[in-house]
Image: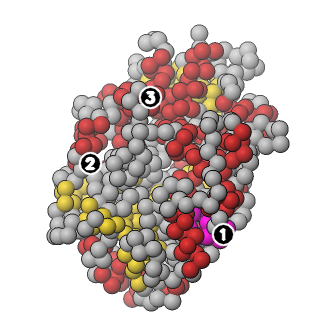
Amino acid sequence: MGKFSGALPTPSWKRAERKIAVGRCPHLDEILGLNEPISRRDFLDGTLVASAGMLVAGACPFPLSGQAASEISSGWTGYTGEGDYKAAAGNTEPVIQSAHAVRDGQYDKAPSEVTETGEVYDCVVVGGGFAGLSAGLFFHQRATSNRTCLILDNARIFGGVAKRNEFVVDGHRLFAPQASVHFQPPYPNSFLKGVYDAMGLDWDAFKSYQKWQGPPPEISLPRSAYGQGTIKGKPASGFFFGAKYGHKPGIWITDPWGKKLEGTPFSETTRKEMLRLNSEQPVVPPLVYDYPGDPVSRQLDSMTLEDYLIRTYGVSRETIRFFVAGEMSGGFGLGPDALSGFLEHEWSKTIPTVDDSMATGIQMFPGGNSGMIRLLIKTLIPEAIEGPRTMEAVWKNSVNFAALDQAGQRIRMRLNSTAVRVEHIGEPAKSDFVSVTYLNDGRLQRVRAKTVVMAGGGWITKHVVRDLDEARRNSYEQFNYSPYMTVNVAVRNWRFLYDLGISSAAWFEGFGRYVNVRKNATFGVDSPTTGPDLPTVLTFFIDFAKPGLPARSQGQLGRAELLSTSFADYERRIREQMTEMFASSGFDAKRDIAGIVLNRFGHAFINPQPGFFFGLDGKPAPRDALRNGPFGRIAFSHSDLAGAMDHRNAFLESERAVSELLDRVLT
């Protein structure tokens, strides 16, 4: 178990799933700021759309399971921020529509109207996130200088989930992560250190974070969206309990762990179990494996993480689903009820780093790991971002989109390009080329490749690779995925938190579960200071776990909820939640909220069930067929093959995939 840093789950039986009729109370709308200027709201890809008051809450703009394509609901996207990532918040409507067309069989028959570009590449990489860009990096490093590579990405900007949101608030440019939040220092001679060095990651840039500019006492802020600050040497965190716990307007318990949860409405049994989990006090010796694949690791993989925690800590299933589920969902999408026990040691043993503590190890770009993505693209295509390859220039300067796809470049990036058919020309074992057909701005185009790296998620790869063999196809059928949403709320100040004596908050009812204020590395922001009277961005993480249901059912129900809820409905929920918690300390939603961006990801996390890593009952692990060698001239590198969506796993999978192709295929 890892330390929980004050972040707590929202239990499924208390999670707000109500559908609120938009505009139900004009007076309340005014109080919540729902009638504020359109610069905050009612935009679709930068274009003004119909008033949210004309929407039917819950109308779903996307077919969920093979239905015919439907019209896009204009109130689904909302405001998307400023800068390079405007109109690129999460899975956008065009991206979802194109992917669903592939899933629903629109391209099952080879289309007749395809433009042959005449291009032939030594390698085509499908996917422009961490897996795809690192595959491009490894190809660039290891292939001879005359070899060429094309990276296809379905979005309007590269990065996958590692993108950022930008706001301009009262003259300050602010950043926040869409997903993929922070990173840790690697071992000095490790593979991971080599990748960071190759992209130009300058560790010295993270020696300077914003200083305090505010009244005493100072709150020492964390560097990550998952951390907590301290005030007078004690945690600056609080738990909120509202109406569902018999408190209206609500109460705050500050430094709840330091107080041993005294004053909380939890039962004595629940308190004891929560404290035992948080302080990592096992009642029997934990199961710790020596190496992946040894008997202990296989034992862990044979049980759910929930059963392992019950065994090890002697706590109830109910407490785990109440307390641990939300914490786990931040890294795996679902709670321990559906996940393999092998994940207990995922971060500490599978992909270890020198220091993964929030206090001294964790580092974060102002907008999350989009900073690494920008360094990668600058390394592969030097003209892709204006200016030198320094941390500040790459972070602050604009993307030169015209430079991404120019003839004569060794590495090219083609955006707005959804791969719809990837297949060998001839028998896979004897083929010399792979045909890659993609949809670019509404037109089907085709290139040929000597090798292909499939660096997108397995949920779409299994549909795109048309001649995939039965063993690999059966493997993909055992992969489960869950959705997630990151909501970034720009506020003009955070005095309402400071006056409570906290910089991070957790709650157990309503919308979300946790939020904090963080300080930023100074190379990426326009102010070297921070304080409660300056603007900031609060990041809310929203899971869709339904503990107790099978993993696949949880994912399907969660996606239906994510895709069927309008921007206006989610906006109302976040404004209501913040008002309930912070109005007593001076928060005014109408005055203080400067912008809200929703980042929805339909398949944010792989959910590895027991047996995912090493197999069960004598059967191979689902991922083995996809990792044990290339399929003809095609290799697979997406991070879900590792069982955890993490940029480090993406690097490892891509290094393997590129090595397979260079060692065995590309001559």
Q: Are marks 3 and 1 in contact (CB under 8 Å)?
A: no
Q: What stretch of residues is rendered in magenta? A: 316-325
Compared across the picture, whether 539 is left or right of 244 comes to: left
Look at the numbered disc 3 and give the secondary structure of its residue.
loop
Q: Where is residue 136 shown, x and y percent of the image?
A: 48, 27
Asked if the stretch drawn in magenta spans residue 224, the answer is no
Q: Residues within 10 Å of mark 2 (few under 14, many from 20)?
A: some
Tell me the residue at 25%/55% (across/down): 173
Is 665 placed above or below 125 here?
A: above
Query: In the image shown, does 99 or 639 lie closer to the viewer?
Result: 639
Q: Which residue is mark 1?
A: 316
Q: Where is residue 376 shown, x and y percent of the image?
A: 39, 33
> Residue 220, located in which quarter of the rendered image?
bottom left
**What mark, if any, has residue 190 been given in the picture?**
3
CA gap, disc 2 and disc 3: 25 Å
Q: Is residue 101 at all visible to an observer of this figure?
A: no
Question: Sequence-wise, which precedes: disc 2 or disc 3?
Answer: 3
Q: Is residue 479 at all visible to an observer of this figure?
A: yes
